[in-house]
């Protein structure tokens, strides 16, 4: 890579990355196939997050990894104005989103692809992924009024549904 190409490549913001364990691997690596994945109880259909060896509803051990739609609604949010990490420039939105498949299936994430002042409670959003090594972090971007996702600009400024870190 030339110096000019290196200078034009956006630097990914620093992120604290999770330990990828057998029970969390489907969630952290599902973005490779552009899928948001959770464990689902085979007995009652309950989606489990964070992962657990048993269904918290019916206590069944019969669990299967299942992809969800990736559509959600902003449940709560805050705008961070503090510089906590180099290259993770404020302001940015930290939000809790509720997945459409289940009222209590919630994720803490960042809202990307819009101005921080445009985020609101109840805002329809859709998952987009950003790759960090062997982990795909799920972020959420606004959905256009037509129901189609907007062109999401991810946390590091790139434009695509799923991105890889520069080599």
Image: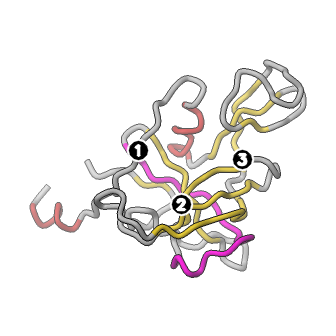
Residue 81: numbered disc: none
Residue carrying label 2: 110
Q: CA distance from mark 3 to mark 2?
A: 18 Å
Badge 3 marks a residue whose secondary structure is: strand
In this rendering, the label closer to the viewer, 3 or 2: 2
* Quadrant of res 45: top right
Coloring basis for residues? secondary structure
Q: Earlier in the sequence, mark 3 or mark 1?
A: 1
Name the residue: 59% across, 38% down: 27
Q: CA distance from mark 3 to mark 1?
A: 25 Å
Q: Is residue 142 left or right of residue 145?
A: left
Was residue 65 drawn as part of the magenta stretch in this picture?
no
Name the residue: 58% across, 73% down: 150
Residue 77 against residue 49 in the figure, above or below: below
Residue at far left of view: 3
Image marks 3 and 2: residues in contact by CB distance under 8 Å = no
Q: Earlier in the sequence, mark 3 or mark 2?
A: 3
Mark 3 Cα shell of 10 Å, populated few (<14), some (14-19), many (≥20): some
Percent coordinates x, y for residue 68 in the rendering: 72, 47
Badge 1 marks a residue whose secondary structure is: loop
Q: Is residue 42 left or right of residue 147?
A: right
Residue carrying label 3: 68
Q: Is residue 93 left or right of residue 143?
A: left
Residue 16: numbered disc: 1
Write the start and end of the magenta stretch as one range. 115-132
Image marks 2 and 1: residues in contact by CB distance under 8 Å = no
Q: Earlier in the sequence, mark 2 or mark 1?
A: 1
Percent coordinates x, y for residue 137 in the rendering: 50, 48
């Amino acid at each position: 890579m030339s110096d000019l190409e290196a200078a034009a490549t956006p630097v990914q913001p620093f992120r604290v990355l999770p330990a990828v364990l057998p029970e969390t691997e489907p969630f952290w690596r599902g973005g490779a196939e552009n899928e948001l994945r959770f464990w689902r109880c085979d007995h009652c259909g309950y989606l489990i997050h964070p992962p657990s060896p048993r269904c918290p509803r019916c206590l069944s051990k019969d669990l299967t990894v299942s992809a969800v739609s990736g559509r959600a609604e902003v449940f709560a949010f805050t705008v961070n104005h503090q510089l906590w990490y180099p290259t993770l420039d404020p302001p940015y939105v930290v939000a809790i989103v509720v997945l459409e498949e289940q009222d209590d299936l919630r994720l803490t994430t960042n809202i990307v692809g819009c101005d921080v002042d445009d985020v609101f409670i109840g805002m329809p959003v859709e998952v987009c992924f950003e790759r960090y090594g062997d982990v795909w972090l799920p972020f959420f971007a606004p959905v256009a009024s037509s129901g189609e996702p907007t062109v999401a600009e991810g946390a590091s400024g790139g434009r695509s549904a799923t991105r890889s870190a520069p080599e």
